[in-house]
Image (cartoon, rainbow, N blue to C red):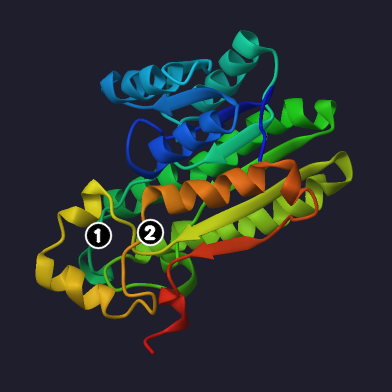
Amino acid sequence: MDLTGKVAIVTGSGRGIGKAIALRLAEAGATIVVNDVGDNAPAEQTVAEIKQMNRQATAIMADVSSSADATRLIDTAIATYGKVDILVNNAGITRDQLTMRMTDEEWDKVIAVDLRSVFLCTRAVLRFMLKQRSGKIVSISSVVGIMGNIGQANYASAKAGIIGFTKAIAKEVASRGITANAVAPGFIDTPMTQAIPEDIRKLMIDHIPLACMGTPRDIAEAVVFLASDEARYITGQVITVDGGFSLGKI
């Protein structure tokens, strides 16, 4: 899959799955706009690693749950590189709590970062992609958005919302040569899941038919495929990358 000459924005790409996606897109030849919020050191580290591949990259710090920041991210990327070919909506957080104990802030923050940001960044980039009559939008959902999960009503709602949003957008923009798809990761080995107690991790792995956790690279490979010309006839779809977890225990 060759993405030479393409410009990609990856939200939340200072670390974890987002960083893996940014690095894999760069390996395929794309110029990368790395986005994060807060401490800019992780984003700059991702940029440095991309430049070591002799690829172009820049970091743009922005809170993509803010309409003004999301618009600034897209506009700055276009001003810097002249276009945007690929948008990967990856930014996300969790605030886990049983619904009866969940605060308004815990609900609102997850919906804002995980779902509202997808709408804001997509809306902003479509202004350009529609004129360009081409583009690839890939949003990171989750198997939790398909299956639900105890203590994650906010996260499950946001990730399910991404699926519905993706299908709607795919229908709206297909006539302009733009595709929109989602990737739904399962149990992925990241710093967040590494913090889970070992007995709980083992229990979860026992429910995965392939009997192992996925890696951020596994997610990145699916994203690169959907962002490539090889996936030109795929739109409105959800690619589940979970080792069979969502199939249920064997």
Identify which residue is drawn at 29% across, 55% down: 189
Identify which residue is drawn at 40% across, 73% down: 148
- The quadrant in which residue 237 appears is bottom right
| Numbered label attached to residue 155 | 2
Left or right: 236, with 233 as reference point: left
Asked if the residue at tag 1 contacts the one at tag 2, i.e. Cβ–Cβ closer than 8 Å, the answer is yes
| Numbered label attached to residue 55 | none
Amino acid at pointer 2: Tyr
Q: Picture coordinates of residue 222 (x, y %)?
A: 55, 52
Residue 186 vs 191, above or below: the answer is below
| Numbered label attached to residue 96 | 1
**Along the line of sight, the residue nearer the viewer: 138 or 172:** 138
Q: Is mark 2 on a helix, strand or loop?
A: helix
Residue 182 vs 75, above or below: the answer is below
Residue 192 vs 210, above or below: the answer is above
Q: Pick out the residue farthest to the top.
A: 80
Quadrant of the image containing the C terminus: bottom left
Q: Pick out the residue farthest to the right.
A: 175
Q: How crowded is mark 1: few (under 14 residues within 10 Å), some or many (20 or more)?
A: some
- The quadrant in which residue 135 appears is top right
Amino acid at pointer 1: Asp
Q: Picture coordinates of residue 186 (x, y %)?
A: 40, 64
Identify which residue is drawn at 66% across, 35% down: 123
Q: Picture coordinates of residue 248 (x, y %)?
A: 41, 84
